Amino acid sequence: MEKHVVCIPTGVHGGKERFPNHALAPQIREWRCDLTALSQRYNIYLVASNDVIHVYQPSFPDQSLSEPELVIHPPSTGQTGPGIFADNHRSINRILVDYLGNEEILLLARDDGDVVGYRTEEIHRALERRTTKDEPASEDDIHCFLLRNVGASAWGLAVHREARIIAISANTHCITVIAYALALRDADPTRETENVFTLQARGNIPSITFNDESGNFLLSCSIDGETILWNLRDRTWVSLIKVGFCLWANKLEPPKEWVFGRGNSCGCPDAQVYIHGNWGAIALDTRCAYELTLEEETALEPKSLESVFLDVTAHKTQFTIHESCEHLSGLSCYFSDESESESETEESDMDIQLAAVQEALSSDAAPRRVRQPLSEPYCSIKPNSESAETAKEIQMTKQPSNPFLIITKEEIFLFQSPQVKQGQSRPECVVTMRRPLHPGEWSLDLVPEDRHCYFAQIPELGVFLVGSPIGRVGVFTLYWTKDEGNPQPRYGFKLEYLLPFREKNENMVVGMYLESRLAGVAVAPVQE
């Protein structure tokens, strides 16, 4: 099938050439989420290195990087909430650049629970104040507008531009919502002053995202395998979604015997390391989705599963693995000095995941090649019907209806809507692809680090990206089609590229080397 977008490499800046002495390279911490970000307004590329932010200005057209133009040292609240990484509680778990109103901001979440916010305009001004390119930039006039501790290791960050809301998730199992005051004449009366409140979930939440234009609804993803749609107006949950593939699933029902993250686990390989955990969600912007006819959609080799799922995993077979790294297709970098980002009481997640890594390291055998396991799909959307009053309020509020993605450790799921139609118990046509970054034979030996914890969307192109620390990124396009007799569009996605690929063969995948790892994915317009 013809590609809808064209991916052209503009340049490579090799780490070995840049830092011949590896000890002098900036330290990029393991087990984090996105540690890179690009400004949409300025030529600024940001990389979190342990507990500081390196500021670069990529050159046009090859986007190569010089030394950092500036290093930002975020302040501390003085509080130290329970963290994961004992060697440095101030290390950064995630950074995000987004718009809050008309201001572009940089947010960073740290292991000690601190969340710090900057205005990118002040970072840009610090760079512009230099009289020469060689003059070092000063961070003295870069002030943080947000400095707050959320009680424990902070991970998820989300910003709603129009509603001027910042949301933060932490390993307290809570989401902190900061709703800044609005000066608009027709604004909600409750927004005349700044509001700060929390939402209580049930597990560690590595990712959150807003799911509507008004800022009333928020999606949270937890390593327990739950995605929750929250109504911020009444501060309660609207629906709880569980989706995945499991050996213990039965008739689309999630495995009941499985206690997520504890000693009890399902029969799936490596279940104890959150194989069914949710790492993110993307509220899809459909304005630039392209039309695909039903006949063209058959080229994706869709397979109907349980009348709910449309499995397009077969489409990834268009890609092949370069022979130099084929033997690594089931492996990733092993980082035995640190462990997973989700800490629990009793037997900690850290102990569980470290044990899994050590077990993998102790084996001299090649990755086990097997046919795809006979795991069954499961999918449930539970509405909040505990309170009639709450249900009535929810009905009065405009509900989000756009499609969205749930990104788990090993799969991608596209839901047409976050809620089921009245009278139905299952969603319609959930599009899925299993292990999209692994086009080779099925392997049992994917290790905990190989997870879909990096993702981004390019609405102007109808494109979204999903990446893993193993060093692979999938480039997907969003399409719509119409089923016979149904006037409403049905959305799906197509895997266009796997990065990195061979210079003369864009369908041959390379990369995933044991000595390197991916730190994040970042998108922005090319410099003018």
Image (cartoon, grey):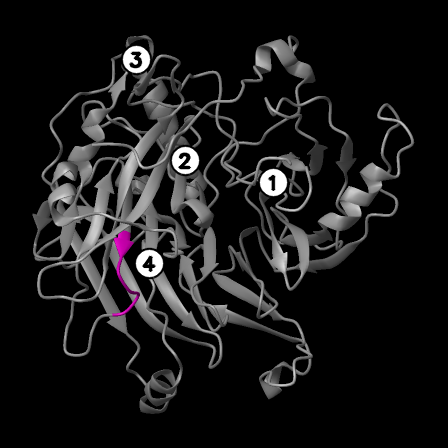
Q: CA gap, disc 2 to disc 1?
A: 16 Å
- Total marks drawn? 4
Q: Earlier in the sequence, mark 4 or mark 3?
A: 4
Q: Which of marks 2 and 3 is nearer the N terminus?
A: 3
Q: Which of marks 2 and 1 is nearer the N terminus?
A: 1
Given this view, does label 1 or label 3 mark the residue nearer the observer? 1
Label 4, secondary structure: give it.
strand
Q: Do the residues labelled 2 and 3 touch (CB within 8 Å)?
A: no
Residue 38 - label? 1
Query: Residue at label 2?
Result: 467
Q: Is residue 244 magenta?
A: no
Rendered location of residue 157, percent (x, y) = 55, 54
Residue toward you, 325 or 212 = 212
Rendered location of residue 217, percent (x, y) = 44, 70
Label 2, secondary structure: give it.
strand
Q: What stretch is highlighted in magenta?
A: 414-419
Residue at image location 64% in from the left, 40% down from the top: 91
For residue 96, above or below residue 203: above
